Image (spheres, rainbow, N blue to C red):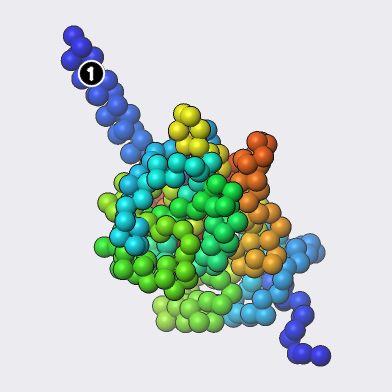
Amino acid sequence: MKTYVIIFLSATMLALGGLLALNAIGEGPVETGYAIGDRATDFSLRNVDGNMVSLSDYPRAKGFVVIFTCNDCPYAMAYQDRIIALDHKYRPLGVPVIAIQPNSPEAKPGESLDKMRERALEKEYPFPYLLDEGQSIYPQYGATRTPQVFLLEKTPDGNIVRYIGAVDDNYRDPGAVERKFAENAIDALLAGREISPQTTKAIGCSIK
Amino acid sequence: MLVGCGEKRQRAVPPEGETSTTQGREQVPTGEASAFPIYDFESFEPLLHQGDGKIHIINFWATWCKPCLEEMPHFERIHAEYRDKGVVVVLVSLDMPNMWKSRLEPYVERKGIKSRVVILDDPQQHDWIPKVSPQWGGGIPATLIYNQERRTFHERGFTYGELVAEIEKFNL
């Protein structure tokens, strides 16, 4: 009996999966990945220094600025100094930056672990720069483009998604930024205030 | 006084048939110029609401976006084959100012692009992306197809056949 229930459930899930897949071919973006309030998965991904990195490696962290970014995207390049600045500012406060490169090096040779290492050394990245090998993590988060920020709060129930979106409101000119979306979100999280806005939109490079 | 310094960026002329006098939001001038009209979102927005009975295909792309370039020939073919049937193609480049001369113009020249090309240069993306479509997450390629009766938005790439199928859902 139990087996039948499981089979029935599996069939239902397959059917649902099929519907979602159909929808993906149809119109508009499909709501997959995390929403605000969801618990984010941990991972074990290779860093440019060769070591594996997980969120659980940071027992004292209060949260994480998980940023999906990469080497060659013009927007990612425009933001790399600001991502470094985020880490300098918030790592000492318990919210370090964890950068994940989600593109497949097979599809984009400029995004290999070697090329990532070159960039990390050149820019002296103070944060881990991880390769999403096999591309298993970014789809779970629902990252769609680079750069994209997922702010996580560490709680007894796991790492909870508190903000998804852009670093700020002006990719082109850091001096003309009016709203530091990510910083405001981290400040609010640390102060126990409500985060607003919880999601923002920006043009980015699609992940391949 | 330094020539060019502090000069206001030239505003794109309003779309044909429009006599809008609204001024776009002032931005930090980049000092960059282009052979193509440069819009901020405010001056660009009328292109998303033309009430001229035509079907408008507004494609958002950039030269650094590989899937955008892959579908470019399809939009060009639509322009060639449907222009006389009341279909207007507008290719909206989101290339950054430092790419207009170095990448965008050479690309359009090299490929002999015949569709209308405009530049949307407005860094306040969080404000204008939802005004193009609430469905848009910000990825490109992205394409808006509309006339007075119908409006569809697609955050994905197209084949020629898929594009024709979408157009034919409209009353030509």
Q: Is residue A35 above or below residue A49?
A: above
Tell how many labels: 1
Q: Amino acid at mark 1?
A: Ile
Q: Nearer the viewer, residue A80 or B131?
A: A80
Q: Quadrant of the N terminus of chain A?
A: top left
Which of the two residues, B86 or B143, is positioned nearer the viewer here? B143
Query: Taking B103 as reference, is B2 left or right?
Result: right
Give the residue at the far top of this rendering.
A1
Q: Residue at x 75, y 84 (%)?
A: B5
Q: In x, y percent, where is residue B109?
A: 46, 81
Mark 1 Cα shell of 10 Å, populated few (<14), some (14-19), many (≥20): few
Query: Is A25 located above or below residue B122 in the figure?
Result: above
Q: Is residue B85 at all visible to an observer of this figure?
A: no
In depth, the one of A60 and A33 nearer the eye is: A60
Task: Output the chain of dot 1.
Answer: A
Identity of the residue drawn at 31% across and 33% down: A17
Q: Position of residue B118 (x, y in %)?
A: 58, 69
Left or right, A164 with respect to A135, comes to: right
Residue A199 placement (x, y as % from top left): 58, 44
Where does the image place residue A193, in percent across and percent down from the top left? 68, 36
Question: Disc 1 designates what residue?
Answer: A6
**SS class, disc 1:** helix
* A176 with respect to A58 (left or right): right
Q: Is residue B113 above or below residue B86?
A: below
- Tell me, yes or no, if residue A8 can be seen here: yes
Identify which residue is drawn at 47% across, 49% down: A66
